[in-house]
Amino acid sequence: MDRRKFMKFIGCGACAAMSSHSGLLPEFLGGVQNACAFDYTRELSSVEARYYKKLPEGGIECEICPRRCRITDLERGYCGSRENRGDTYYTLVYGLPCAVNIDPIEKKPFHHFYPGTSAFSLATAGCNVNCKCCQNWDISQSRPEQTENFSLPPKDIIDLCQQRKVPTIAYTYSEPVIFYEYMYDTAELGHKHGIKSVMISGGYINPEPLGELLKHLNAVKIDLKAIRETYYKDYVDGELKPVLDGLIQIKKSDVWLEIVYLVIPTLNDSDDEFTELARWIKNYLGVDVPIHLSRFYPQYLLKNLPPTPQTTLDRALSICRAEGLEYVYLGNIPSHKAESTYCPKCGEMLIERRGYRTSVSGMSKNKCKSCGKIIPGRFF
């Protein structure tokens, strides 16, 4: 970022995230108190992409995600953010976020990763799937020419985090996999300066790039959109199995993992699905992986469905707990008691949450003050 283009800090306590459409702003407003504003740039990047191969017959094959797009000269992949130019593949969004904000870490959501801290959050245009319920479709389903972007290279992000004393960078809002190179370099540089990195993703990524990326991440939150392949085919335009394989890969690493499951009326809210979900997590990840059962609100291509009833979420909560999952949360229901963290051994409240207000009063470092049980996660 050109320093002269750095305009000002806004301590407005209101508007923060920036995108090309003013109608998107409410998606990014919650809990915002400190935002940064920058000048826009119309230039796209020409940084060579990683994880692709040139094909003998001409063209290239992208190897970032399971979609494996085959792309001829001057064409782009499904995500719209990578382009073949003379059989060299380029990312067009390196250093060009279209949304930048400082969020509570609970907004991602992470409930076991340094509770009460903040995250410098950013996204570029593009996505490698097309969820019909996407709340950020304005940027995820746009090409970078269609969003208003900011010139913000990795070094400037680190500088801003240090100036604002923000301990973590979050790659979020759209799909970080499509701006892999930008995320990777920023996370790597951040670690050298003591800044943590977390990825909020749909998890549709191939094993090799994921493995390399995990070396520079501290936590990952995966949106597990359903536990059945048919849902991924009909409502995501993706596949379930690569996501499940990625969850297992993340769990086996040293990176902290949490899961969100958006409960959508009539589409993924049956008792059988909640049971299958809980059993898969218990069998393949463990009972101590937090899951956030989140309330759906009509968005994008699913405006014909109502918001998730409270009774449905309570039913999902009961089923997951009955199957043995120890940290089950309800999301998008401010002030519900299931926002808070309780000790699975003695039942004491450990972390109280009311919206994005967080109080860690029942823990001493990573242990329950009452019974001494070790609570999984990353805590001070």
Image (cartoon, rainbow, N blue to C red):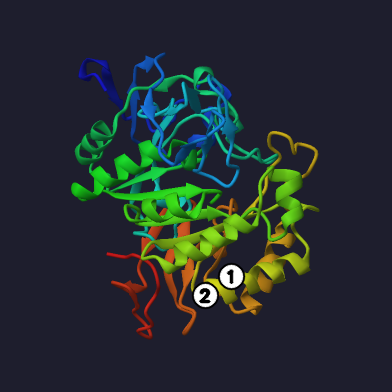
Residue 323: quadrant of the picture: bottom right
Quadrant location of the C terminus? bottom left
Label 1 or label 2, whichever comes before in sequence order? 1
Front residue of this view, candidates 337 and 221: 221
Q: What residue type is labelled 2?
A: Gly
Q: In this view, does 96 lie above or below 28?
A: above
Q: Where is residue 292 in the image (x, y as percent from the top left)?
A: 56, 60
How far apart, in angstroms, are the residues tagged by discs 1 and 2? 6 Å
Q: Residue 133 carries which label?
A: none
Q: Which amino acid does label 1 sit on?
A: Ile
Residue at image mark 2: 286
Quadrant location of the N terminus? top left
Crowding around mark 2 (Cα neighbors within 10 Å: few <14, some 14 to 19, many 20+) is some
Q: Where is residue 28 in the image (x, y as percent from the top left)?
A: 49, 35
Crowding around mark 1 (Cα neighbors within 10 Å: few <14, some 14 to 19, many 20+) is many
Going 33% across and 56% down the picture, which residue do you hit? 215
Residue 262 horizontal side relative to residue 326, left or right: right
Q: In this view, does 32 lie above or below 194?
A: above
Going 36% across and 65% down the picture, which residue do you hit? 254
Going 24% across and 50% down the picture, which residue do you hit? 191
Q: Position of residue 166 (x, y in %)?
A: 27, 44
Do callouts 1 and 2 mark residues in contact (Cβ within 8 Å)? Answer: yes
Q: Where is residue 30 in the image (x, y as percent from the top left)?
A: 48, 40
Residue 31 horizontal side relative to residue 195, left or right: right
- Does dot 2 land on a helix, a strand or a loop? loop
Kindly tell me whether residue 167 is visible in this rendering: yes
Going 52% across and 54% down the picture, which residue do you hit? 222
Query: Which residue reaches farthest front?
Result: 56
Kindly tell me whether residue 15 is visible in this rendering: no
Q: In this view, does 46 lie above or below 159?
A: above
Residue at image mark 1: 281
